[in-house]
Image (spheres, helix red, strand yellow):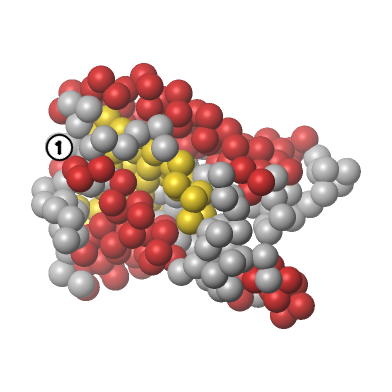
């Protein structure tokens, strides 16, 4: 068991029951962390908070638009007023869209980047001051196998580009803040057993599975376990890294 006693963990996009964020939040809570649940979906935020509290752990929820600096800054202040510190930020929030480059609009591109990259930037920037003050912090961001191999599973070129941008941004940030006791890492999930996967036609699903050496989609818990480790004190010598979690569908 990793020890997160008295540590405060923020997980963006953790209000949705469909993705990975809720599992990430529950995993940190089970290791003793105090959770901050963020999402633009207030009902989802409240639901995740209730789930964590019912399991005997501590959590607060804050409806946050991560694409708004004012919203993000207000969220961070609320966390500091409540807990007095921020130890871990998990940049999980993200959106996708299945569209070809030929049919893509500039607004499509901006919408994807606003959440997947610019929102991630705002959240990461906002936690740096308190993390530097305490000389400790962990930032873990979700990229994607699509950011490395150029799609092939879900989303369009704008999604792949935004997830590739997350990798470059995170490596640079890791160099900037290492001296302050802050590590910055990414995980790159492949096909994961979420509602999106379950909605695929069988023929398309079988084709995707045939390209995965382990022969199955990953589980949200498998992603959460890696993120939880990277957020721990035990991972103190890992920074600027991107961890592939894809069953062998992409290796580099």
Task: Classify residue 106 by image quadrant.
Answer: top right
Q: Residues within 10 Å of mark 1 (few under 14, many from 20)?
A: few
**Residue nearest the observer in this picture, 210 or 170:** 210
Q: Quadrant of the C terminus?
A: top right
Q: Nearer the viewer, residue 230 or 105?
A: 230
Using the rendered image of the protein, determine whether residue 226 is visible from the camera's viewpoint. Answer: yes
Residue 228: percent from the left, percent from the top?
Answer: 30, 53
Location of residue 17 in the rendering, given as x and y in whole percent from the top left corner: 46, 68
Assign a secondary structure to mark 1.
Answer: loop
Q: Residue at x 16, y 61 (%)?
A: 1
* Residue under pointer 1: 84
The residue lying at 68 percent from left, 71 percent from top is: 210
Q: Residue at x 25, y 20 (%)?
A: 179
189 with respect to 208 (left or right):
left
How far across and how far down the image is residue 241, in percent? Answer: 42, 37
Residue 40 shows in the view:
no
């Amino acid at each position: 068991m990793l020890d997160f006693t008295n540590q405060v963990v923020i997980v963006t996009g953790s209000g949705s029951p469909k993705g990975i964020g809720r599992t990430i939040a529950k995993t940190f809570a089970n290791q003793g962390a105090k959770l901050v649940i963020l999402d633009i979906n207030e009902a989802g935020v409240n639901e995740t908070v209730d789930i964590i509290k019912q399991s005997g752990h501590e959590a607060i929820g804050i409806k946050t638009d991560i694409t708004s600096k004012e919203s993000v800054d207000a969220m961070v202040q609320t966390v500091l007023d409540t807990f007095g510190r921020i130890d871990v930020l998990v940049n999980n929030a993200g959106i996708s869209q299945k569209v070809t480059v030929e049919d893509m609009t500039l607004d499509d591109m901006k919408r994807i980047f606003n959440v997947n990259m610019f929102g991630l930037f705002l959240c990461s920037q906002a936690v740096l001051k308190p993390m530097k003050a305490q000389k400790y912090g962990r930032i873990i961001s979700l990229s994607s196998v699509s950011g490395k191999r150029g799609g092939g599973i879900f989303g369009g070129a704008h999604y792949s580009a935004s997830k590739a941008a997350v990798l470059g941004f995170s490596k640079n940030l890791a160099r900037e803040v290492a001296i302050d006791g802050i590590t910055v890492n990414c995980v790159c999930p492949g096909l994961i057993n979420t509602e999106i996967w379950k909605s695929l036609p069988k023929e398309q699903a079988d084709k995707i599975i045939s390209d995965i050496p382990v022969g199955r989609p990953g589980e949200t818990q498998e992603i959460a376990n890696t993120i939880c480790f990277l957020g721990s004190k035990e991972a103190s010598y890992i920074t600027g890294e991107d961890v592939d979690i894809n069953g062998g569908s992409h290796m580099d």
